[in-house]
Amino acid sequence: MKDPKSTMAMGDRKKIIIDTDPGIDDAMAIFVALKSPEVDVIGLTTIYGNVYTTLATRNALHLLEVAGRTDIPVAEGTHKTILNGTKLRVADFVHGEDGLGNQNFPPPEGKPIEKSAPEFLVEQAKLHPGEITVVALGPLTNIALAVQLDPEFSKNVGQIVLLGGSFAVNGNVNPASEANIFGDPEAADIVFTCGADIIAVGINVTHQVVMTADDRDKLASSNGKLGQYLCKILDLYYSYHLDAYEIKGVYLHDPTTIIAAFLPSLFTYTEGVVRVQTDSITRGLTLLYNNQKRFEEETEWSDKPSVKVAVTVDAPAVLKLIMDRLMES
């Protein structure tokens, strides 16, 4: 696959805001975005998930400093679920207590802006109607709060590309649920049914994009500064995947979702209404109604807007793109 041109006019670049819970694969996704000429990262918003929100903010600021992009604002997100729940599931056993492979980097010098993440999302969507792509890499609470804060947000935002759901494969928190949706199922259901232009990239797709141990060695031997940084933090992530999945590689969930935001042609999609189960042992389950049957009865899916759900991915092309961007960094 030819790498897209790196001489794009600023006006051609897609404006993106990354809602993130860094996280090792979030770090990779942020770096890929910053090194992709197709996109202009105009802000990071933070959310709990891989770590608590305060640490997510610290890590987002740190990653921007590592990348030399402290011009990009960071807006801190909510510390609670949409129903004000404070018992949060945090995946520090995957990403380390510091979220970045237990490297204990010094604190960043930067600070988040005064606006909250939902306020920043609403403001930017209003300033640039139809032009902003929000790439949501964690639980969807900030996005749902933006929907509640401004009834026009769903129309103003250009697109929401989200990592979430498992769509007919087992989840990664339990057999029913994927981690981001499980983190706040009520928020996820609000987002899926808000009427925005949505692409959902689930783990049914991201589990096909694997960075092997050989790929990591290739990254380590490159001159890319950001690639070198990632190699430092990846050890724990590889260990987790070996224990949990018995594979000598890591799933590239977040970087794959970033690629879907600006090269959607590397994926195929189905369309339908997605609803999220909010109770019982299947809490967090995402269920797509594929529109193939017209039901006589009213259902919880009736008269709800459709979204796109990724069903296949050109995994070699996505992996090559991620590797190329990081090795050139």
Image (tube, rainbow, N blue to C red):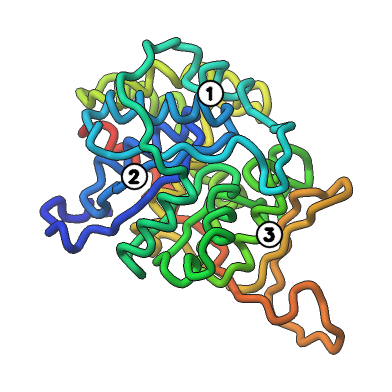
Q: Quadrant of the C terminus?
A: top left
Q: Quadrant of the N terminus?
A: bottom left
Reading the image, the residue beneath label 1 is 237
Q: Earlier in the sequence, mark 1 or mark 2?
A: 2
Hey, what amino acid is under mark 2? Gly
Within-10-Å neighbours for mark 1: few <14, some 14–19, many 20+: many
Reading the image, the residue beneath label 3 is 189
Task: Tell me the distance, in whole angstroms, between the alpha carbons under discs 1 and 2.
Answer: 26 Å
Residue 200 higher or lower than 271, as above or below: above
Within-10-Å neighbours for mark 2: few <14, some 14–19, many 20+: many
Residue plotted at (86% across, 85% down): 297
Hey, what amino acid is under mark 1? Tyr
In the image, is 228 to the left or to the right of 242?
left
Closer mark to the observer between disc 1 and disc 2: 2
Closer mark to the observer between disc 1 and disc 3: 3
Residue 272 x, y percent position in the rendering: 63, 73
Q: Are marks 1 and 3 in contact (CB under 8 Å)?
A: no
Residue plotted at (41% across, 40% down): 75
Residue 18 higher or lower than 323, as above or below: below
Hey, what amino acid is under mark 3? Asp
Residue plotted at (46% across, 72% down): 155
Count of marks overlaid on the render: 3
Reading the image, the residue beneath label 2 is 43
